[in-house]
């Protein structure tokens, strides 16, 4: 994958106390167990649940599925709320076999390719490959750092007319990127330059941003022999669909705010995602669009003359008995099953992809309720440790944090046989003296892609963080001892992080104005590994901040622990973690 250096980068990391505190504070009311293991036995890695690796783009129900994400969306009342964002889908023949494939941009930043292994009339999809592109940006608001959606609408089209399918992405931040296919018509390849601006499609001559939640469409809407830009905008109170005439060529387009015009007024509709299709079979392209509340509307074109665009009154579109297709939907009209009628393919907020089959006739479409598309899971299920999570760099792929055991499943029966079958690793042995049979392992799964096998080059400071999510109550001025068994190799840096803090309310004695102060009580202890098991023993003690109110001087604080790993390590094992209060 390629990282856009022009976008700010952030890592979900447990290296700061506040990051750990966010998870630990969920359990802040749980009492501490004096003189006993504060991890309540979860550091032995003997408790588990069954999980499905996400890296085949197929979930545990065997449905095509990307990652889920939320984004800050301006609502109709002017307030900003977090909303689940759906995947965005493009349909095109990316590998030259004349079958419609799926290209899916999920809101986490991963772009998936699902080749069609069926026929023109009976499409079939197995698993997804991750396309090596990273467009993820970040935005900041009062609630802290929020991830922006890198590609809230994706288009697959031969942008530069060289016979290969390229990609275009509209971003949450109001950018449009052209991603050229530098491979062939049958073997696609996507790469990006060091300077992402080389592939920006500007909509202002000065290059400045002016909107959000862009949904581009590159099409010859006026039938003039040259493709223009149609653009949906998600800026509150300006949710129109715009038309940008192309002042350049199809291969080298030029767009300017000076010639921009409103193609369709939003009139209360928000976060519009236009697509073009000849809805009524009259030879002119019409506009179909989704919107924030899940409604889908079609605007029948009466005049495609840029001097006098005209559309009939908007018509709502139904799918089965429902008038909604899903929040922030981006409906894609395409003949999915080869019957000569266009169907609607759409991404869902649950990360899945669905298709609504057209059962009408040319010029009079009638759609069934959308059905989510099945796939085939290519990675086996695994045992995940209860109480522990893995925070990886957002552009990292193919990693899982799982349980392993050296117990031969053939020698076991019942549930233990089933567990060992999912976790068996030949030759594995736990630390010396361990009473358990399982350990945690950070593992990188093999990339099973056929067309895309490279992965993103992670930044040098990218970190993998293995976190205990249970939350622990530490008392001030009290000694604690943390022991951890670790094993790994290849990491440039490794550290044990004990994280926690306080949010203090301070009242100004003169003005009675209240101010807030964040205090970190975190501690980071670096350690090294030589390849075999080694035992870490670390002590921890903290004192309350001087501004802590007297009534809270002895109140415990919520803490978490994590292992932070940097570099290009091969794997990492962890076992027998304990946290105890020392008398």
Image: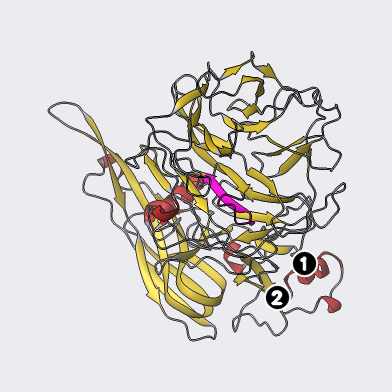
Please indicate whether residue 311 sits to the left or right of residue 186 in the image: left
Please indicate whether residue 568 sits to the left or right of residue 438 in the image: left
Using the rendered view, name the quadrant where residue 89 is placed: top right
Residue under label 1, please give it: 419
At 49% across and 36% down in the image, what residue appears? 213
Percent of width and height locating residue 77: 47, 19
Please indicate whether residue 79 sits to the left or right of residue 349 in the image: left
> Does the segment drawn in magenta span residue 388?
no
Looking at the image, residue 377 lies above or below residue 223: below
The CA span between labels 2 and 1 is 9 Å
- Stretch of the chain drawn in magenta: 158-169
Percent of width and height locating residue 417: 82, 70
At 41% across and 29% down in the image, what residue appears? 259
Please indicate whether residue 427 sits to the left or right of residue 40 in the image: right
- Along the line of sight, which residue is nearer the eye, 371 or 24? 371
Q: Which residue is outermost to the left?
A: 510
């Amino acid at each position: 994958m390629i990282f856009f250096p022009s976008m700010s980068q952030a890592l979900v990391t447990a290296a700061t106390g506040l990051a750990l505190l966010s998870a630990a504070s969920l359990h802040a009311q749980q009492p501490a167990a004096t003189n006993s293991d504060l991890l309540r036995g979860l550091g032995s890695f003997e408790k588990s649940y069954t999980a499905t690796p996400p890296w085949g783009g197929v979930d545990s129900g065997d449905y095509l599925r990307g990652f889920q994400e939320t984004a800050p969306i301006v609502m109709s009342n002017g307030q900003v709320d977090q909303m689940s964002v759906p995947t965005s889908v493009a349909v095109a023949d990316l590998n030259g076999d004349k079958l419609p494939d799926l290209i899916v941009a999920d809101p986490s930043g991963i772009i998936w390719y699902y080749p069609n292994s069926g026929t023109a009339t009976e499409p079939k999809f197995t698993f997804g490959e991750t396309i090596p592109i990273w467009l993820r940006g970040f935005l900041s608001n009062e609630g802290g750092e929020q991830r922006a959606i890198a590609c809230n609408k994706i288009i697959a089209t031969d942008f530069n007319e060289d016979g290969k399918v390229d990609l275009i992405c509209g971003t949450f931040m109001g950018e449009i990127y052209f991603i050229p296919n530098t491979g062939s018509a049958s073997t696609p390849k996507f790469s990006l330059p060091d300077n992402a601006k080389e592939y920006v499609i500007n909509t202002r001559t000065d290059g400045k941003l002016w909107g959000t939640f862009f949904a581009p469409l590159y099409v010859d809407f006026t039938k003039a022999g040259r493709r223009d830009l149609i653009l949906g905008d998600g800026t509150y109170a300006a949710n129109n669909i715009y038309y940008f005439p192309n002042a350049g060529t199809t291969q080298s387009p030029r767009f300017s705010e000076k010639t921009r015009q409103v193609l369709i007024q939003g009139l209360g509709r928000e976060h519009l995602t236009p697509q073009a299709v000849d809805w009524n079979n009259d030879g002119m392209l019409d506009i179909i669009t989704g919107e924030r509340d899940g409604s889908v509307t079609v605007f029948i074109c009466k005049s495609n003359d840029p001097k006098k665009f005209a559309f009939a009154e908007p018509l709502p579109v139904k799918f089965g008995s429902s008038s909604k297709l899903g929040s922030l939907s981006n409906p894609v009209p395409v003949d999915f099953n080869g019957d000569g009628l266009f169907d609607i393919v759409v991404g869902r907020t649950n990360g899945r992809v669905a298709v609504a089959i057209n059962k009408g006739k040319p010029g009079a479409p009638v759609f069934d309720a959308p059905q989510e598309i099945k796939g085939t899971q290519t990675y086996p299920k695994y045992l995940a440790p209860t109480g522990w999570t893995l925070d990886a760099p957002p552009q990292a792929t193919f990693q899982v944090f799982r349980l392993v055991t050296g117990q031969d499943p053939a020698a076991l029966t019942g549930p233990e046989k089933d567990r060992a079958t999912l976790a068996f690793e030949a030759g594995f042995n736990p630390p010396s003296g361990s009473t358990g049979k399982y350990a945690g392992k950070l593992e990188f799964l093999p990339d099973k892609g056929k067309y895309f096998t490279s992965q993103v080059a992670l930044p040098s400071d990218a970190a993998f963080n293995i976190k205990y999510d249970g939350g622990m109550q530490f008392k001030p001025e009290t000694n604690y001892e943390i022991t951890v068994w670790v094993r790994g190799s290849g990491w440039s840096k490794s550290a044990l992080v004990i994280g926690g803090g306080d949010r203090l309310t301070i009242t100004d004695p003169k003005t009675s104005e209240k101010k807030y102060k964040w205090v970190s009580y975190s501690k980071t202890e670096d350690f090294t590994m030589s390849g075999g098991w080694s035992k870490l023993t670390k002590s921890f003690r903290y004192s309350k901040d001087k501004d802590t109110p007297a009534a809270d001087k002895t109140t415990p604080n919520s803490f978490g622990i994590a292992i932070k790993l940097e570099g290009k390590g091969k794997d990492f094992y962890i076992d027998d973690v304990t946290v105890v209060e020392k008398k």
